[in-house]
Image (cartoon, rainbow, N blue to C red):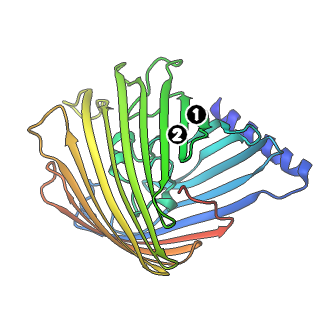
Amino acid sequence: MRYLFYIFIVFLASNSFAANKTNPDIGLNTLFTYTSSTEGNSGGGETTNGFAFQEAELSISSNIDTNFRGSAIFAFENEGGEFHFVPEEVFVETLSIDSVTFRLGKFYPFFGRSNQWHTHAFPFIDANQTREQIFGEEGFNEVGLSVSYLAPTPWYLEFVAQVFNGDNERAFASGVNDDVVGVYYLKSLWDLSGDSTLEWNLSYAHGRTQLNEQNDVYNTALTYINKFSNSQKLILTSEYTQAQYVLIANEDVPGTFDSTFRTGVSSTWVQFQFLKEWWAQARYEVVSNILNASAEDTTKTSGLIAYVPSEFSAIRLQYDSIDDPAADEVEQRVILQLNLTTGFHPAHSY
């Protein structure tokens, strides 16, 4: 039924394009990687050494008329050696209502600093743990409706109220079909000077899990940006997410059982553009078990150097040190990524 919804949205948009006799904005992003990890040859880990086609995204967007804009992003994903073509985002949103925007379809909810980013727009090659640890590898991506309001304040102040099906298997996915997830998001942005800004995000989501438990997810993020010149910029971000997530027993593995964990995840990273085409970055993340104070934290330290000759291409080299108490030793990982965009390049979130 949902795929019929996606097809209907695309069909509506394509008919509008034809009626307007205009071409939509079309772009294709491709990601290729080479990985070398101390766990990459174990066979049982998430990391696999060698070359990989990480992902490709096809984006199509255009104003339908003066009232609506349509967007669709489809991903070619590599899962265990098999490629899948899936709709990541397919939605329409309003254009003509002052200070208010309605969005309907499948999209990444306005939640936290990093949830709305697509893979090619991640500040690092992999997703932040504040997103992946709570919502899983694909992040928080749902079908629903959002209403955003831009307040008439001297500074940028936006409030977004959203409702979704809540299919995320990690955090929600209630067994009752009409159970929904409510998501609320507040974004404030202040100009500290002509070259520096401070952004604060506050998010809250609530819904029922697969075990029919009420789950409350909290997030707060603070970002400072300072542009020193046309070739030098500093971005400093700190984000924290807290939630409970559910692991359902694997029927093929004896002795496993349904489990609920309450987790707090912090991620702090810095990005420094020291030359026009060069960036240096560092990140530190901590995953804590809130229900068991004696449990050791999982930590991840990352460093990255990026050569970005244009908005359409980037070569990035990243090093990770992952200290997971459940593992026998600290994992050391190096990833080289080629990031290419052909055609239209949509603007990234500020």
Quadrant of the image containing the N terminus: top right
Q: Is residue 312 toward the left or the right of residue 235 in the image?
A: right
Q: Residue at x 54, y 29 (%)?
A: 164
**Classed neighbour count for the residue bearing mark 1: other residues with Cα under 10 Å, few (<14), some (14–19), many (≥20):** many
Tell me residue 176's x, y (percent).
47, 17
Residue for point 60% across, 36% down: 148
Q: Position of residue 231 (x, y in %)?
A: 49, 79
Residue 271 seen from this side? yes
Q: Which residue is mark 2?
A: 109
Q: Is residue 50 left or right of residue 146?
A: left
Q: Which mark is residue 62?
A: none
Vertical arrangement, residue 72 with respect to residue 236, above or below: above
On the image, numbered disc 1 is attached to which residue?
A: 143
Q: Nearer the viewer, residue 48 or 240?
A: 240
Residue at the extreme left of the image, as rendered: 294
How many numbered circles does the render carry?
A: 2
Note whether residue 113 is visible.
no
Q: Residues within 10 Å of mark 2 (few under 14, many from 20)?
A: many
Where residue 258 sits: x, y (%)?
27, 26
Closest to the observer, 52 or 312: 312
Residue 342 vertical placement versus 160 (above, below): below
> Could you say whether the residue bearing mark 1 is in a helix, strand or loop?
strand
The amino acid on which the numbered mark 1 sits, given as a three-letter code, is: Val
35 w.r.t. 274: above or below: above
Q: CA distance from mark 2 to mark 1?
A: 9 Å
